[in-house]
Every structure is written in structure tokens, then in C-alpha cells.
Image: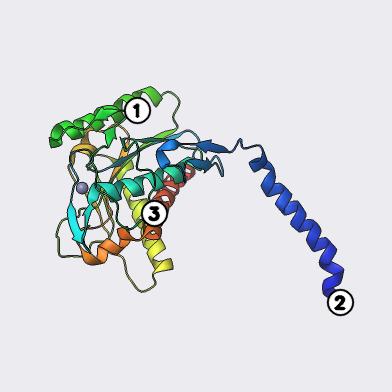
Amino acid sequence: MVLSKWKPLLSLSLLILLWGVSLPLAGQQNVRTFPIFGEKHEKVTIVDSSLAGVVFYVVSGHGGPDPGAVAELNGHTLCEDEYAYDISLRLARRLLSHDASVYLVVRDPDDGIRSQPYLECDKDEVCWKEQTIPLGQIPRLDQRVIAINNLYSKRKPTASRQIAVILHVDSRGTKERVDMFFYHDSRSKSGKKLALTMQRTIRAKYQKFQKGRGYTGKVVARDLHMLRETSPTAVYIELGNLRNPLDQKRFIVEKNRQAVADWLAEGMIAYLETLKRS
Ligand SMILES: [Zn+2]
């Protein structure tokens, strides 16, 4: 009896709710297309403008002729660069949904976001925007440093912040399971703060979603070419150890790759929030 009295009111509020949600989508102005994510994921809905003005450089490690760490699992070859790339795409897409500017510095013209557990190893990645990636480590890293620093200068007059994030999956020590950890340049206060904030976010996520697991990922200052030579505030993240059987689950299962990307995005957003407050 009581229910029936409220029913018309409930339907009305539901109608208002649906109306409110469907209006912005109807015009499609909040949806943008980025073919790099592949056909299934190329449409990105802009959910808010919380990252408007922020420029991100997402750099997945290795690529082109260099696969990075290589492992074998169930008759499949796992290449570090492919898993780092898939997570970098998911991270970029998430940042774009908050209206950020994002440069995928390492790019694959035909891979897009992939759902399968075993990502095929290929060599057709290029460096922003269409440069063939050289095999030698120093020319390869210099190529991406130059690409980032040129864009950084171009975007500097209008960007509110510029952040570079470098993703790898080859933590040292092949036998150990390794938690996600963070490197920053020793001279970069902002890089250190970014790394610490991301670490805090990841710890909170593990506490929430995998109670009792524990998280031991560290923040470490390290003299790395990509941190030393790039102009934006930079963080270098080891997502785990692709050669470790326990870590492999973090990368083989699609929803885990998505969770890693989402958590990293949340960590970066949390860092930007701390800047607004200070
Ligand atoms: Zn690597």
C-alpha cells in the first residue's frame, strides 16, 4: 500500500534521471574517436573535464625491434613490450575520458586494445609520430626523449601540467614475485611526489580489493635515461616481472590489465589533486 503511493513519484524521478543521463550522449559531443585504440574501443566518452589542460606522455617500454623481457607460458611467447603497450593504451584511454591531452609515444598502428590473454609479439611499433624505432638502446631512448621534449616545448605555453609515465614489466630478479614499484629522478621533487602518491593509491587499491595480500612496492630514486633527459615530471613504473609465474597473472588476464591501468590513472589524478590543494 505504501509502495503504490510512492510508485508514480519513483517513476518520475527515474525518468528525470534517465533523461539527465541520456541528454549529453544524444548529441555525441562528449564522444571522441581515437582509432589507435582499435575498432572496439576507439570511441571515448568524455565523462568530465577534471584533466583539461594536463598533458600526458605515455611511454610503453621497448617496442619495434626490441621485445624487452620474453617469457614462455603454455606454449605461448610473452613479450614485455606487448603487455606494457596494452596497459599504456588502457591508461591513455582512461586519462582521455577526463579530457586530458595524451600522447602515446610508442604506438602500434594495428594492435589497439586487446582482450586475449596471449598478445602476439610483433615489431611494427613506431615512435611518435611515425618514426621507425632503432635497435640500439641509446638511439631508441634518445628518439623518444626528443619526441617528448619537442612536444613539451610546443605545449608549454598552454598546458597546466605535463607528466610522462614510462611503463615496464621486467623487474630485476627473475625468480621473485615483484610488486608494482616506482622510480623517479633524484633531482625531481615533483617526480618523487608523483611516485609517492601513485604508490599510496596502489597500496589502497590492494587493501581494498585483495585484503590480506599485502603490498611491498617501493619508490626509489634512480638515474635512468628516460627520467634524467625528459622535460615533464616523470615517473618510471615497473608493473611486475613478466618472467615470474605469479606476476604473469597480472598481465595475462584482461581485467587485471584494465585494473592496473585504472589504478595508475587514479594515482596520477590523486597527484594532480594534491597540487590543487597546495
Ligand atoms: Zn622493460
Residue identified by numbered label 2: 1
| Amino acid, disc 3 | Ser
What is the x, y in percent for residue 4? 85, 71
The CA span between labels 3 and 2 is 49 Å
Q: Which mark is residue 111?
A: none
Residue identified by numbered label 1: 152
Which is more N-terminal, label 1 or label 3?
A: 3
What is the x, y in percent for residue 63? 23, 41
Q: Does residue 84 appear to the left or right of 201 in the view shown?
A: left
Q: Is mark 3 within 8 Å of ligand 1?
A: no
Q: Can the viewer see residue 257 in this picture?
A: yes
Does dot 3 land on a helix, a strand or a loop?
loop
Q: How crowded is mark 2: few (under 14 residues within 10 Å), some or many (20 or more)?
A: few
Judged by depth in the image, the label closer to the viewer, 1 or 2, is 2
CB of mark 1 within 8 Å of CB of mark 2? no
Query: Depth check: 146 or 161 in front?
Result: 146
| Amino acid, disc 2 | Met
What is the x, y in percent for residue 108? 32, 38
